[in-house]
Every structure is written in C-alpha cells, then in structure tokens.
Image (tube, grey):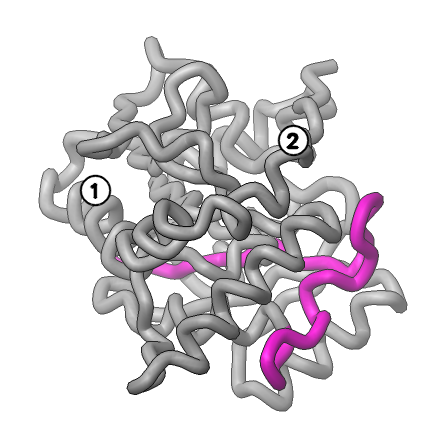
Amino acid sequence: MKTIAIIQARMASSRLPGKILKDIHGKPMLQYELERLRKIPSLDEIVVATTRSAADDAVADFCGRFGALAYRGSEHDVLSRYYEAARLYGADVVVRFTADCPLVDPCLSERVIRHYLDEAGSFDYCSVDVKETTRPYPRGMDTEVFSMKALAEAHAEGVSQAEREHVTYFIYNRPARYRIWFATADRDLSNYRLTVDAPEDFELVGEIINYFARAKPAKPNFALKDIIALLDGNPKLANLNKSVRQKELKKS
C-alpha cells in the first residue's frame, strides 16, 4: 500500500495572489507546509500538484529547488489534476492537502491516516471534518484520506463544477456509497481560522510562525495545541482575521 500526499497548489488566488510563495520569516509559505508534511510517518511520498499555467512556473521551480516531487495538470479541473498525479506516482492511498494550510498539524494528520490504514479496508474516506455544519477543527488543519479506487470513480463519474473543482466533493456527498469517518475533537475549535485566503489570514499565520521562531528556545515544531494556547492567551492576535468569511462552495 503506497500512501501519497498530494498538495494542490497554484499561484492564482482571488483575494491574495501568489500567497503560496509569499515570504514568512525567511521562507516561502509552501515550504512550511512541506516541512510539516515530511514529519508524518505514514506518508511514502509528497507531491505538489500545480498547473500548466505560466504563472505556476514559479511553483515548479520552487519544488525543484526544495527537492519536492511535482506534477503539472489542468488549472480548473482540479479533480483530473489530482487523479493524474496520483496515478503517475502509483498511489494506493491518497492524502489530500491544500497549499493554503502552512500550519497543518502532523500529529493530527497522522492520526487520520493511521485510522484509515489500521482499519484495513473499513473506510473509503477519512477526514478532519470538511463539512460546514459539523466542523470541530479550525480551517487550516484539513486532511483527507481516501482510496485510489474512490478517486478514480470520482474522476470518471463527477460532472458538476463542484465535483471537478473540489476533489473529494463527489466522495463525501455519497455516504450511502462510500464508508466515511470524520475525526472528532475534545473541544470545538471551529471559531479559529488557520488557513490563508485573505491578507488578514496571512498576517495571522505570519505572527504565529514568528512567535514560535522567536521563542526561547525556538519551537519550529509547534502543534495545534500550542497555537490554540497562544491564541487563547492573546485575543488581539486571535481577532486579526475574525472578519474574513470563507468563500462559499459553488455547487452547480
């Protein structure tokens, strides 16, 4: 069983263009996420799935310099880009990440991956919850694990804009067909926002990274619990991106 993480990444962004390679404390934002994913024991490989657009030459160049695997596919048919990358690198199990989550917690991601692998075929899809009504974790911790078989079926059968643009939409919206499990949390943390979509998000993430970089001693491997402790103790910091509203999913 080959378990491959695939990060969808592109420079285009309506609210913060070029965000994935913007500098934070001396490193591109995407590098932080890659470094964190490399700490997940159950991953065999990590692939950055970017596009064939000229704007994403910079992403491919970064992957080359950083020593990260890359695949370039369709800009707008993200599902096909994902499927082609997974097939090219021989995935049996696919773990989906997005490049706007530089603070993803390796321990939480490992927990979800291990649940999928250890249950030996009991599930088709395991996730840090992506459903808007029940999400217990902050945005930015997203981890989705699913079979190559389910991905191939989604690619072959998905026809709507939402199904082509959002890789797992086809799967998690069919609970009668796919066996699904969502990770639970001891505390509802959904009021925190740790993804990067808007300038306010980027400011908050930069402040968090800089805080742990300046700590004595420095703590580069900070976890979600450390972030929450910091934000709980610093309401002004926590409020930096409170006004940001997540873009609505287009379901047509």
Which residue sits at x=41%, y=50%? 231
Which residue sits at x=25%, y=27%? 181
Tell me which label, 1 or 2, sits earlier in the chain: 1
Tag 1 secondary structure: helix
User: Where 32 falls versus 116 (above or below)?
Assistant: below
Residue 116 drawn at (x, y percent): 21, 42
Residue named by callout 1: 116
Magenta residues span 1-28
Where does the C terminus fall, quadrant-wise?
A: top right
**Mark 1 or 2, closer to the camera:** 2
Residue 23 drawn at (x, y percent): 68, 76
**Label 2 amino acid?**
Gln
Q: Quadrant of residue 143?
A: top left
Mark linked to residue 183 = none
User: Where 176 falls versus 219 (above or below)?
Assistant: above
State if disc 2 and disc 1 touch (CB < 8 Å).
no
Q: Is residue 11 visible?
A: yes
Q: Please tell me which residue lies in front, 67 or 245.
A: 245
Q: Is residue 185 left or right of residue 193?
A: left
- On whether residue 187 falls in the magenta region, the answer is no
Where does the N terminus fall, quadrant-wise?
A: bottom left
- On whether residue 13 falls in the magenta region, the answer is yes
Which residue sits at x=55%, y=75%? 31
Q: Please tell me which residue lies in front, 66 or 213.
A: 213
How far, Cα to Cα, is label 1 from label 2? 28 Å
Residue named by callout 2: 246
